[in-house]
Image: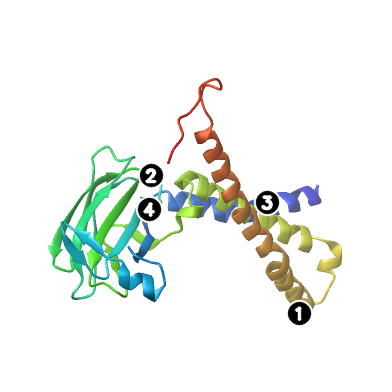
Amino acid sequence: MSNWLAYTGAVLTGLVPPLVMYLIGSQKKVMGYAIVRNETVINFRHPDIEKRLSVTLDGKPLNGCRKLEVALQNLGMKDIESQTVHLTFPAGANVLHAHCASSTLAVGPKIEAVEQDSYSVNIPLMNPGDNVMVHLLMTNHDNGRVLITAKGPGLKFRPFDPATFISPVANRSLLVLSAGVFAWICWACTATDRFMGKPFWEKTITFVLVVLLLALPAAVLAYQGLVPLIKRTMKWKGSAPSNPHSSSEPSF
């Protein structure tokens, strides 16, 4: 009976903190941003070709034309209402064209110029998992620097990686699962009579080695391995034809 009590206590000790973190995180507003593309329109990396090529807009030549794409996404499990995101560029940057679009928002976002080197993206409502793509075309912006900020009551604004984001529920569930793997490995390696019989300092060193060399790498690999697997599965299901006898037109 004592072994079962120890086992139950270890499981609860490992799962309760991630569960509390999960419930607390579900009450926060979390928005992420990612710079998807920040590059010059002409990018051949060859001095002879670059001198012979030029980009024009409405018949006017554009020198140092750069394209910037920024992704904004609701990473939390709570709606974000009436949120404004500011994009600030270095002095002298000239924005020729700016627009934003979303395939998930019920009411489309709007982008407008605040100053010559500052733009704001106004988003009426973002449900969990909703995203907005911001596209800008500019000149006199050789270094490609941009400052992206957002403020709001209870809002956490941070960078994120679109390649590893699935949905708020899926990512938090995988995080809890990886924390469970971490706790189970720590318990399996330390809840033994041989480990308990060691001196205090030897137990401490052994526990640190188990955490750094076994438990933590296993938890990270569990998270990093499941994310691309789930994304590939979702992509495969989304690209699978509904009718096997129908033929799709070629795309160019």
Q: What element carries label 3?
A: helix
Query: Mark 3 = which residue?
Result: 11
In which quadrant of the rendered view does residue 105 lie? top left
Mark 1 → mark 3, Cα distance in angstroms: 25 Å
Mark 1 → mark 2, Cα distance in angstroms: 47 Å
Q: In this view, does 124 lie above or below 56?
A: above
The mark tally for this picture is 4
Q: Is residue 169 above or below residue 14?
A: above
Mark 4 → mark 2, Cα distance in angstroms: 11 Å
Query: Mark 2 = which residue?
Result: 128
Earlier-in-chain disc, 1 versus 3 = 3
Mark 1: which amino acid?
Trp
Can residue 236 be seen here? The reply is yes
- Pointer 4 and pointer 3: residues touching (CB < 8 Å)? no
* Few, some or many residues within 10 Å of mark 2 (<14, 14–19, 20+): many
- Pointer 1 and pointer 2: residues touching (CB < 8 Å)? no
Q: Which mark is residue 201?
A: 1
* Few, some or many residues within 10 Å of mark 4 (<14, 14–19, 20+): some
In the displayed structure, does residue 33 sit left or right of residue 213?
Answer: left
Q: Residue 222 carries which label?
A: none
- Residue name at image x 54 percent, y 47 percent: 173
Give the image location of residue 237, x and y in percent: 54, 34
Protein image colouring: rainbow
Mark 4 → mark 1, Cα distance in angstroms: 40 Å
| Disc 4 versus disc 1: nearer the observer | 4
Query: Mark 4 = which residue?
Result: 28
Mark 2: which amino acid?
Pro
